[in-house]
Image (tube, coloured by chain):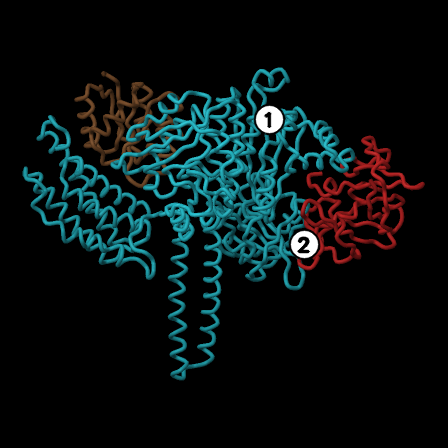
Chain colours: A cyan, B brown, C red
Amino acid sequence: MAVAGMDEEKLRSAFLEEAEDLYGKLGESLLSLEQNGGGRELLNETFRLIHSLKSESALMGFAKLSELAHAMEDVFGLARDGRVPLDRQVMDIMFAGADLIGEMMGAVSRGESDEGVRTEEVVRRLARVPQQGAPEGAPGGSPERVPVRESPQTPADGGLPVLDEFEKRQLEEALDRGEGLYRLAIRVDEGEPMKFPRVFLVFNALEEEANVVKAVPPMDGEPLEDALYGETVLYLTTGGSEAAVTQAACVDQVTVLSIERLDYRAVLEGPPARGGGPDAALAGAPGEAGAGAQPSAEGQQKRAGAEKTSIRVDTRKLDDLWRLIAELVTRKSRVARLSEKMTRGGDVHEASEELAETFDALDKIAGGMQQTMVDTRMIPIAIIFSKFPRLVRDLSRKLGKSIELSIRGEETEIDRGIVEALSDPLTHIIRNSIDHGIESPEERLRRGKPARGRVSIEARQQGGNIVIEIADDGRGIDVARIREKAVAEGIEGAAAMGDAALLELVFRPGFSTREVVTDLSGRGVGMDVVATRVRGELKGDVVLATENGRGTRVTLLLPLTLTIINALLVRGDSQLCAIPLTDVDSTVKVLNTEIRADDGREAWVYRNEEIPLHRLGALFGRGRRRAEEHFAVILRHGDRKGCLIVDELIEEQEIVIKPVDDLLNHRRLFSGVSLLEDGRLVFILDASFIRREDF
Amino acid sequence: MGAKILIVDDLSFMRMIQKEILSQRGYVVVGEASNGLEAVEKYRSLRPDLVLLDITMPQMNGLEAMRKIFSIDPQARVIMCSALGQQNLIVEAIRAGVKDFIVKPFKPERMLSAIEKALK
Amino acid sequence: MVRRYVSFTLGSGRYCVPVDEVLQILRHENVMEIPKAPPFVEGVINLRGDVVPVVNLRERLSVPRDAEAKKPRIVVTQVEGRMYGLAVDEVRDVVEIDDAAVHDDQASPFGVRSEFIRGIAKRGDSLYMVLDLPGIFRSGG
């Protein structure tokens, strides 16, 4: 019995009351699902019912009931996510399971236990469903995500960490501040089903007192497989005592295995992050596999990591792909039948028409699949931005500053391949802003600024690039000082350099050395590394703009990787425009009588829908055509629709997107440009304009 | 110890069990709520020492309720109850300041030790 | 130190840009217009598949028009990794100018905004205005 000492009767009747209610609702839901198919709501609701039944029966100690419900929950979870179709077979098993639940509850209500009911058969059938129901070739019954990133770092059982440039800088700064460097190894109890969040609790608590420079397995970005966090090692620096660190790690279900103080020198001079040095076989320090005999555990881990790289994907994108594949299969059989017909001497003309039609459909499907695959690579930059509010809060508290952070454009999508590479530089820039840019509240007041400093991050898509801007209203950079230093260092042409060129020097390796840095109020630490990462690895660019005493803005420009899209070519007056098919809902004819004007804005009123209206000709700065009726494209962006009147609907075409410069796009209407085969210029419309107030 | 606790879960049976376990230990269950809205209301009026909050509930789920509670009282002590597979929600909750989390179905000792630690 | 510049004319004035920043010089033709562009943006050209914006230097610097340009050219330049075209009246020659001769004059006597000009150099009895290309091609005014 779950709760000792509690009145059995009372417990049982309370359980029954609620469980019977759940069971009744479950029966209804299953029927509804069988008859009408499943909408998102119904699927979720049914899942919740099964889940609740499982939890409650487990608490009561009804092991069989709970086991059956658990098995049903697993299968239903897969069905809800679309991994397994809710076909006749699966529904039958569900109903069988529900019947057994009914039987068991009957027994319980009669004062008996649930043991008497035979559930093994159904449980077994349920366990087999994932393999049967899965599409060909796909693994059966796997949970929604099994992300296994490469983990080519220290095995958690010892050794010094392998650090990259950013981490080394953090250590150097900590050393300057006189902080201690510790290695904390913790273990999560076997019984805890979710290990990563447990470790995260420790990490979180630690960040109040200390700075966690590195974690093995890593804590930033997407977590690896949960089981790997059973034993985690954290490398941290702190101005507090060892006791304070241990205290912070005092989290339920977690034991501290060891805590030791490390020597900065040993760690900083350890093997570099890439390519083991000649002394790779330092005692306990792992080098790259191959640079001398290394423990096989690390090598294996690395090899295993390199083989499996998988990603998390929004299941809706998988749904889209699934639908396209289904259509593909249908069309494919059409072609097969056609071919059969032809061999039997059918009507050639009729067949060729059908063939052409089928080809068109296949073409569209291929395009859709291409686009979807490309889409799966894109994820909102929010994945990087989400940790900044915390970072800002913690840092500003530690440094005694007051800072307000504003984030915009976190829904902007970036290629997931650059997420990791981008995260560090951004974090570094923000740290710089807070550390060296924003002044203390007292100083700010003295300078006539509000005591609260502002840091803003904005991301947006511009042309074929992603633009990320980080700005602060802090000290700014004294360009004159840079010039002084540059001249003193004998840098060529320093005296004649304009501000832009001088600021560019900040990105030069070696220029932002420690002394220069302190002179420049610390600004520039690690900026050369940022530049290398952004310009080299990410093939983008980074630019500094500043106003001495007023603030600084760092702008990153990153190229998008996708360049080919399927678009609808239209004409607005004499200018060609391409609308990505993914933004096109439909094409319609709009009659003048259906247009309503109100306070300078127009809308298309049709069948109870009122859609904001825009005219492409007008957007291009040209006049309005006089006509009774117009061709229009219904644009769809997210949940919003817009009606765009055009002068001509031309055709669908595959186009290569090229970035469009700001000079050509000051109203930000376009997401790119393209050139047709005949050299004509086409602007690619950014449908998100329908959401904006200024249109 | 007499600490005041608010229990939030949409299943009344769950709440009853939790209440029983807590009372036996000497905690005072000052209130119960079956959805997020109620939870915030009760928090406001009862100001408990700790809140046991279920993540998935209809009509304002656990996360939203948690955020609202923290905006009322940044020092609030909240323990989240979650099912398996809700890692992201838990991590988010921890970021927001939740003291601990328990995975359902949980053992009474687990719940008690989490509460004990959180109240320290 | 002495640097080499490509010089060109606009009306009666002489302008120049560092040789490293110049990619190509084209005849002024086939400029495709851009809807709703700022007045100093003439349009774009298709340079072997690349879309290159063309800025009219006269409009940009607000230099009054006196005579018809005899040999109008587009100077294709590279700025911060991107390509831009500059429409000028005539391209002259490559000149050598010493850094010391370039005066970083904030108060420009010619009434041209200093964000477009890096400095003014005297060479012989001619004055050359050294252009600040990033400033010229920057959008937002």
Tell me if A76 is positioned left or right of A483 in this view: left
Q: Residue at x 70, y 52 (%)?
A: C52
Q: Is residue A686 visible?
A: yes
Residue nearest the observer in this picture, B80 or A301: A301
Which of the image's four quarters has the C terminus of chain A?
top right
Question: How packed is label 2: few (under 14 Cα within 10 Å), some, or many (20 or more)?
Answer: many
The residue under label 2 is which amino acid type? Val
Which of the image's four quarters has the N terminus of chain A?
top left
Q: Look at the numbered disc 2 and give the secondary structure of its residue.
A: strand
Q: Residue furthest right?
A: C125
Residue nearest the observer in this picture, A22 or A410: A410
Q: Which mark is residue A36?
A: none
Q: Position of residue A181 (x, y in %)?
A: 45, 27
Which residue in the structure is indicated by mark 2?
C51
Kindly check if marks 1 and 2 are in contact, taking CB atoms under 8 A apart as contact.
Answer: no
Residue nearest the observer in this picture, A64 or A566: A64
Q: Position of residue A533 (x, y in %)?
A: 57, 42
Which residue in the structure is indicated by mark 1?
A437
Tell me if A606 is positioned left or right of A122 in this view: right
Tell me if A544 is positioned left or right of A91 in this view: right
User: Marks 1 and 2: which is nearer the front?
Assistant: 1
In the displayed structure, would residue B70 be above or below residue A628?
Answer: above
Q: Position of residue A484 (x, y in %)?
A: 73, 28
State which chain disc 2 sits on: C
The residue under label 1 is which amino acid type? Gly
Q: Residue at x 54, y 24 (%)?
A: A176
Q: Is residue B72 visible?
A: no
Residue under disc 1 on the same chain as residue under disc 2: no
Q: Look at the numbered disc 1 and give the secondary structure of its residue.
A: helix
Q: Residue furthest bottom?
A: A345
In the displayed structure, would residue A69 be above or below residue A485?
Answer: below
